[in-house]
Image (tube, rainbow, N blue to C red):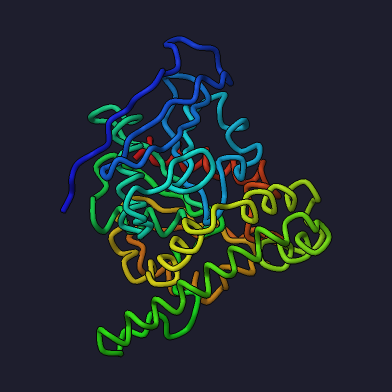
Amino acid sequence: MNPGPGRAVGRRQAAGSPRGYVGPMPHVISSDATVLTLRTQGADDGPIVVLVNGLGMTTDSWGRVPELLADRHRVVRYDLRGHGRSGNAPADDYSLEAHAQDLAAVLADVVPDGEQAVVVGNSLGGGIIVVHARDLGLDRIGGVVFAGSGGSGVTFAGFPADGLPPMARRIVRRSWLKALRLVAVVANRVRPFEPLADRLVRKFAFEPGAPEAAVAQVREDFMGSRRVPLARTTLASVSTNGVRYASALTVPTLVLHGEHDPEVPQQEIDELMPELADGELVQLPGAGHMVALTRAEETAEQIARWVRRVRAG
């Protein structure tokens, strides 16, 4: 069922505001009444770029990328449900389908009728974009960029045990959810011990030698996440093989992949690219998973190039 796009509440950025201006933080109401916070930056008349965060991340995880794009683009970013400044899901629905409805609500609010945006996903954000394309179409999406994302392939081999009977699958899911809640609890408790926390963050998100500030941003975002949304969104992520539905992305799709990305192995990229109707792969030598934080200039440059290509097409 598609209940339709969300409805915006709160103040909007004033027309004619200067380039680089960060306006008031409005809200969008998603289809199930989840409140999503928006951050809008740049010129009113610029091409629209919508940034979709990764798992456990906030809008700050894009680093300087919005600032670098804001001189010629209108950059919109929002916190996922249960993340950052956004509200929790009223019915505890953190499925990728629910996240896709959130993206639809944001697009309906910020993209005028008849226009399209380039949507950029980091990590889980790529999976949200794929599910949106599969379930809700691409009416307001003219192009896609995966920045440190492979479309959210299955993280744990064999999960979610599709070959098991329904009752067994439910037991497996409940067991995984309990385990993931425990992981969220441990993450919250480890966070104050910065040397240990940073070592873990570096292992799972960064290339060797990544800047301390970038590592600290991911530590504060991920390890400070709310436990239930983090656990349930993680379960949704590992339960959905977004690569399987990537053929729904019939618009031009750019894949920025770090050579040392510990979360998105090259095999996942190799499986993703043939599924894309119009895909281009750009490998970033030496980069890890959080390319927006460690390679801001390159990431912004590639996004801007893709916007030009989509508009030219």
Residue beneath the point at 44% across and 24% down: 46
Residue 275, compared with residue 41, is above or below; it is below
The residue most toward the bottom is: 164
Residue beneath the point at 50% across and 11% down: 17
On the rendered structure, is 291 left or right of 168? right
On the rendered structure, is 160 left or right of 114? right
Residue beneath the point at 35% across and 44% down: 103
Circle count: 0
Residue beneath the point at 83% across and 60% down: 195
The residue most toward the left is: 1
Quadrant housing residue 68: top right
Residue 233 location (% of width, % of height) = 44, 60
The front one of 94 and 92 is: 92
Residue 232 location (% of width, % of height) = 44, 63
Quadrant where the image shows the C terminus: top left
The front one of 238 and 228 is: 228
Residue 185, compared with residue 61, is above or below; it is below
The front one of 189 and 52 is: 189
Residue 56 location (% of width, % of height) = 55, 54
Quadrant housing residue 290: bottom right
Quadrant housing residue 110: top left
Residue 203 location (% of width, % of height) = 72, 68
